Image (cartoon, rainbow, N blue to C red):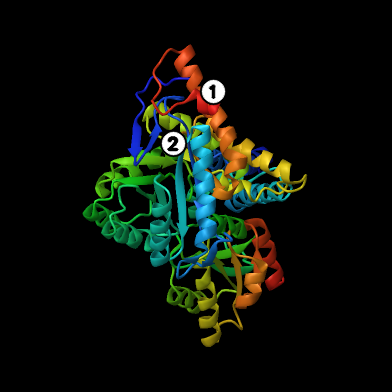
Amino acid sequence: MEDTNKFNSITEAIREGNSYDIVELIQSSLESGNDPYNIFNAMIKGLEECGKLFEDREFFLPDLMMAGEAFTTGMEVIEPHLADTSIETVGKVVLGTVIGDVHDIGKNLVGFLLKSAGFEVVDIGTDNDTEKFIQAVKEHQPDVLGLSALLTTTMLAMEDIIKAMNKEGLHEKTKVIIGGGPVSKRFAEQIGADAYASDAVEGVKKIKEMIGA
Amino acid sequence: MSYDKDQKVINIGNCSIGGQPGENPLVVIGSVFYDKHDALLNEKTGEFDKKLVETELNEFISIVEDVGVQAIVDVVGGYPDALVKECEFVADIVDVPFLVDGLNDSCRIPAMVSLKEKGLLDRAILNSIDENTSDKNLEILNEIGVKNAVLLTFGSNTIFARQKMEILKNKLLPKAKKAGIVNYIVDTALLDITSIDINIETSKLIKRELGVPVGFAPANAIYGYKKLKKYGVSSKYGTIASIMTYSVSSGSDFVLFGPVKYAKSVVPSIALISGIKSYYRKRILKKNVSDKVSFQKIF
């Protein structure tokens, strides 16, 4: 019989951003014979709870970052044990920060939260030119492309990327969502993006809405 | 109220930044040519309302001189040619140092090269060197003889004071050395308004262990605070001033307070904190303060 106390501890550790104890908690749970998939679900629950607390304005940006860090640390332990387990994904998302911009906190948070929501996430990192985004969309054929920028100058590249996607006929299958400090809903409409999100939690909601998940 | 560790004072132009609490007047940094600055007419070409900028800068410096703190102007720009034009103009109007605050390296590094050609490097402070500044750009800075820079302790997974310290020691200080930077001040990189105490803790840690000048930019978060405008103008300015004074009373040597046009709402309150610290150091601790400290101006 699986140990729900251990699962609760794992959920709490992720929610509270406890990167120090998460490794031991997961290892202990594995050694107790718990199903790796259930351990993974406990981790996901931690991220969900964190996201909910962020929406409720109990948690803030550092809390999301800490939870993400704990989740990443935990994944290094659990992922090898999930290799044989097929996890059904609800959709695929490619994320990237545009050219000239190396900010990635928001993008990384969206990535964690999407994974917790059952998405397959391909993160192409920062400082990506239009060609890199197009190549990523062609290769991975995602449901959604997420573009991130934190500077007023770099956000302009988002329009070039959408234009390139239209030209290559990629925008029909892959929707585009944009986010980042200087970005706005109005800007999203101006450049032909399908959605805009003001923070990571809203971003995940919008992505789910876009693909009907 | 005083650190055991010797505290470095960085001298750039007429500004002495850092030292023990109260040793030097605090440094206020106000911004021009930020996004939505009324004076900014074309951010690509650097076309701006010269009269408006000159008026704002003159008022800023006038207040600074009247209340006895020190000033730096933060010149923001998204395009190198525009940024250089803006820096030249500011350098012509005021005789204080200025931050070359290009939005990314593609903007600020070429701007530094141009400022070298124009003979303005002595007062120019590169804003900033961070963990992503490339070796190539560090070499350029070294070649042209840049000596002044802000080191920014920003990183993707960098949340806690100790992590910011690690980035500073292991990445930023080596990069500064490679670039030939000898006058550096540390920006502890604000994440959001809620987590300001992380920056306070970082400031204290850096002063305690390294003894270098520290500060950060509450301006990056306070102007987005949801309740800033809720209770009227006086509440708005009170809130802004409170967060700026909180940052300096807790240990920052400098503070980026936002648009220079807010100087009258912010600078006098920072001067008060500066004077309180200097008085305690001089008259209670019986330790030296610099010649720049003037109780007559502040009080």
Describe the element under mark 1 as helix, strand or loop: helix
In x, y percent, where is residue A50?
66, 47
Q: Quadrant of the C terminus of chain B?
A: top right
Residue at mark 1 shares a chain with residue at mark 2: yes
User: For the residue marked with disc 2, what is the amino acid?
Assistant: Val
Give the residue displayed 53% in from the left and 28% down from the top.
B298
Q: Is residue B129 something that shows in the picture?
A: no
Q: For the residues carrying marks 1 and 2, which lies nearer the camera in this image?
A: 1
Q: Is residue A204 above or below residue B290?
A: below
Q: Residues within 10 Å of mark 2 (few under 14, many from 20)?
A: many
Measure the alpha-carbon separation of dots 1 and 2. 19 Å
- Front-lying residue, B298 or B10: B298
In x, y percent, where is residue B60?
52, 45
- Front-lying residue, B107 or B39: B39
Q: Which residue position is annotated with label 2?
A: B214
User: For the residue marked with disc 1, what is the amino acid?
Assistant: Ile
Q: Residues within 10 Å of mark 1 (few under 14, many from 20)?
A: some
- Is residue B136 shown left or right of residue B128? left
